[in-house]
Image (tube, grey):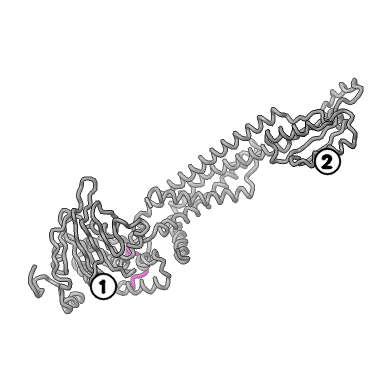
Amino acid sequence: MEHRNVIGIYHLSKRYDDRVILRDVNCQVANGEFLFLVGPSGAGKSTLLRMIYMAEAPTEGQVVVGRWVSSSISRRQIPYLRRKIGVVFQDFKLLEDRNVFENIAIAMRVTGANNYAIKKRVMKVLTEVGLYHKRNDLPIKLSGGEQQRVAIARAVANSPEILLADEPTGNLDPDVTNEILQLLLRINSAGTAVLMATHDHALVKNYGQRILFLRDGTIEEDRRLSVHGFSKERLDAIRMGTESAVWDKRPGGNP
Amino acid sequence: MRFHQLTYLARESVHTLGRHKGVMSLSIVIMSLSLLVLAVFLMATDNVTALLDKTIKDFRVYVYLEEGVSPATIEEYHQTLFAMNEVEAIEFVSKAEALHEFRKELGEEQNILETLEANPLPASFRVTLKSGFSDRDRIETFAARVARMSAVEEVNYGKDFIERFSFLARIFLYVDAVLGGIVILSSVFIIANTVRLTILSRRRSIEILKLVGATNFFITTPFIMEGAFQGGLASVLSLGLLAGIYVACRNILPDVQFLGTDRILLYMATCVGLGAVGSYAALRRFLKL
């Protein structure tokens, strides 16, 4: 895979009136990278993610995503940017009056894809997240983990280059958290860059190639283990769920 | 925008209407009450306009001829007048006919005519003008032209009446246009506020649609379709109410006419349009799209 940046963040600051949310944040995300954004509540993680999918405009600096630049993007272009970015939240954000199939299909309907293409693709992602048998259920009938899998399926329906996840496991118990992480890793190994925000340090200890520590609106540390932090065997083991990745087991030492 | 996307959005609107029956019915009732004002306004306008038209139709210019005009001259004048642009119809009233009419008008008091030696009434033409020539300035020009003809004694057309009438008609037109504008604006305002209820109840869905990259067109189209549909239903409901009021008030206002078919169709189309515009206004205002 060629190495290029899918997200570029340059001298980014965000203020609401006098309150500083982010201060001079710089970072680039390469294609196919798996990146954790770690920090306590209120550190500015969500705001940073919101600025990547351009729900907010920077006060200073700029965000570059693909061919879009925050300083010059028009409101009319934002929908097209969003189709290239999958976003997942702690509260899932599913349409409660639509079944699982429609919740995923909607991401393609907005692009004008035809019914045949939608059906084919939705069936495929449903199988990938293991919810094909629940395609006709309403979200309310699903467990939290299943709802999050629907949300992830929706996020990847348009095969985005970037998947943003804002505390995706915040409402889930440890077993399910593990499942969701496996799923994100699988999506990542298929080539999608994943940027996951979490306040849970323990989680990050077990997985991860690169970690951004965010505190009080600035990046304290950008810890790169290496772009390909895990050996293929270990990654496979992690994905199979037979082994959890722990820092101190890694060849090359302990952070 | 592709066709299948539009059909999807249309189906969406139908589903949404079905899913939110309560809110939708409430909005339709509120809309129909506000649209009823428009219907009453339209009906009042039509009735006043009809009255004005009728008055103008009954209007005649009287052209009195000099004493002893020959039948050949009368015939010639008849043709000359009829050839004029302004003239719709001409009726010739001979001296004898004028006297006969006068007698009829006098009724029991016609014995006062016994003392007359000769018929004092002149022969005349009663000229009906075409509807485009019924304003004061044009009538005046026409009258002046006719008065210059040699055998014409006098032209009479109730100058005071026509002046007052055209003044009132003009005032009515202005007031009516202003009132119409106010009624339509307030309908849009009420509809927009009603649609706001539906928008607020669907805020989450709208947020999700934006998140997955829906264009404003995709988000707003179902609302606009629903607004149009609600406007259409509300127009039927308000016409029903109007018909009820009309029947109930028949004894008090016997001369008032109900809306004609073309008016009903125009009204319904307007309501559909107002529903759509109201929805759009609400979306702009409350979603900042």
Please tell me whether the stretch drawn in magenta is mainly helix, strand or loop.
helix
Q: Secondary structure at mark 2?
A: helix
Q: Where is residue B137? Give x, y as percent.
A: 68, 34
Q: Chain of mark 2?
A: B
Magenta part of the protein: which range? A132-141
* Nearer to the camera, A85 or A179: A85
Q: Amino acid at mark 1?
A: Gly
Q: Chain of mark 1?
A: A
Q: Secondary structure at mark 1?
A: loop
Identify residue for label 1: A191
State which quadrant residue B135 falls in: top right
State which quadrant residue B176 falls in: top right
Using the rendered image of the protein, determine whether residue A167 is visible from the camera's viewpoint.
yes
* Nearer to the camera, B182 or B63: B63
Q: Where is residue B11? Give x, y as percent.
A: 46, 62
Identify residue for label 2: B79
Callout 1 environment at 10 Å: few (<14), some (14 to 19), or many (20+)?
some
Q: Is residue B27 magenta?
A: no
Q: Amino acid at mark 2?
A: Gln
Residue visible at 66% across and 37% down in the picture: B52
Residue visible at 81% across and 35% down in the picture: B125
Give the answer, above or below, for where A203 lies relative to A62: below
